[in-house]
Structures are given as structure tokens and as C-alpha cells.
Amino acid sequence: MRLDKLVSMLGFTRSEAKKLISSGRVKIEDNVLRDPGANVKDDASIEIGGEIYNVKKHIHVMIHKPSGVLTATEDHKGARTVADFLPEALLRRGIGPVGRLDKDVTGLVIMTTDGQLAHRLISPKWEVTKRYRATVEGKLDEKCVSAFQTGIQFKDFTSKPAGLEILSANENESVCLVYVTEGKFHQVKRMLQAVGHPVITLHREKIAMIELDENLSEGEWRELTDDEVKKLYILTEMNEK
């Protein structure tokens, strides 16, 4: 791989990479290289300005999305997006969200530079389960659970069978877990509304086997562990990159 391409994979533009290299600030295996076109190994140890970098073909992170934030990398109206919480170097790599969360919904968002992985995680074919915690108006009961298990018919679609686990319920409000394998527009809210229980708050806790890290406050993020990444690639029957 060309040295300038390797450096640009760390989040630098190609012109920035060439300047860093020509100025002698880039070391490969402890050797200063000044030729942007030099051929280097993909997994070479790279040091820039005294800082050692870990070169990965793809990057995968989880972020704890706050309410009022769009699940996007940019918004032409200037609204806050999940990208606002990430460093510029990651954004330059082309990282993007896997699916969407409504603006007022909080919780887990996975972001990746691997477009094929992202596509499979949201594709109906792979039926990836998402778990939500919802607080709703009124008292949920077993009729609601049965309706979810059967599937709820709307004008534009009929939901696939879904899971509804009631954690607490009284006349004023209930707390439940919702398990869905689809990602239709406002789906969880619409399903709960359809059984007579409008959503008060909604929070996504889990996608597939990836659970939101309880140590992450709203707006915070971390890279997925090697084990978490491996599980996603196995689930989607892809070779890890």
C-alpha cells in the first residue's frame, strides 16, 4: 500500500498526509520515510509526530445518543447529529450510523466505516433484533403482549411478530421492553400506540448482541471491542475486515 494512502486511512486528507510525510514526521517501523508513494505493509507500525497509530481497515463504534440529536453525519438545517460527538479523524474515514433512531429517542447507535456490514445489520433478511425500553401511558396487559406476538396491521405495513415484556404496570403508566427485527418509520412508537399506550420515553438498549455500555453517558462513545466486532461479522456471515 502507498504510504500516503495508509496515513490517510488514519483520518488525514491525502494532501495532509503528503505534507506530514515530506516533512519527515512519519515513521514506519521506526524509520522516517519521506516518499508519499513508498510501498509499505498494510499492518505496518506507524508513528506520526511521536504518536503511534493503530491502522485498521474499518472502524466500528457505539455511541449513547441523547434526545434532540439526529442519527446522521450532517444536517443541512444545522441540527445536532451524532457526528458532533466524534473526532474529525473518524468522520474523515467515512464513518456512518447503522440505521436510525428518532430524534427524541435515546440510546445505542452503532457507527461503522463498513457499508456492507451496516447494510446487513439493517436488512430485513438478517432479522437483527433490537431491544428498546419504553415508558408508556396506561396499564399494559397480556392482550398487548399477544398483539405484538401476532403482528400489528397498519395501513402501510403489517409488523412482523415482536416481543413485549412488561416490567411494571399501573393505571398511569407502564415500563416495558420491546424486541423488534424490523426498522420501519416510528415502528415501536406506532405499535405501542396501536395497542392503546402512547410512548412517553423510548430508549434503545441493544442491537443484536451489542448492548449499550452502561459506563457511557449521553453523548459519549467508544470503539467496539474485537469480540463485539467479531460477533457482528459472524452474525451477518461476513469475513471480518
Image: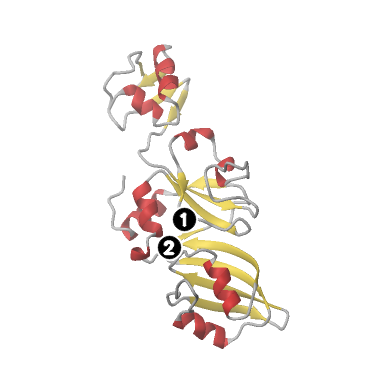
Foreground label between 1 and 2: 1
Query: Which numbered disc, 1 or 2, marks the residue that appears first in the sequence?
Result: 1
Q: Measuring from the top left, give residue 235's x and y in whole percent.
A: 34, 60
- Identity of the amino acid at label 2? Ala
Task: Give how far apart the Cα atoms at labels 1 and 2 are.
Answer: 13 Å
- Front-most of 140 and 198? 198
- Identity of the amino acid at label 1? Gly
Residue of label 2: 208
> Is 34 placed left or right of 178 in the picture?
left
Residue at the image position 48 percent from the left and 65 percent from the top: 184
Local packing at callout 2 (Cα closer than 10 Å; few below 14, some 14-19, many 20+) is some
Residue 91 in sight here = yes
- Front-most of 193 and 26? 193
Residue 213 in sight here = no
Q: Measuring from the top left, give residue 53's x and y in whole percent.
A: 43, 30
Local packing at callout 1 (Cα closer than 10 Å; few below 14, some 14-19, many 20+) is some
Q: What kind of element bears circle 1?
A: loop
Residue of label 1: 99
Quarter of the picture containing the N terminus is: top left
> Is 201 placed left or right of 207 in the picture?
right
Q: Measuring from the top left, give residue 193's x and y in whole percent.
A: 60, 75
Query: Is 58 drawn above or below residue 172 in the view shown?
Result: above
- Front-most of 132 and 184? 184
Q: Measuring from the top left, give residue 236's x and y in whole percent.
A: 32, 58
Residue at the image position 41 percent from the left and 34 percent from the top: 54
Quarter of the picture containing the C terminus is: top left
Q: Are marks 1 and 2 in contact (CB under 8 Å)?
A: no
Q: Residue furthest right?
A: 172
- Front-most of 28 and 203? 203
Residue at the image position 39 percent from the left and 58 percent from the top: 121
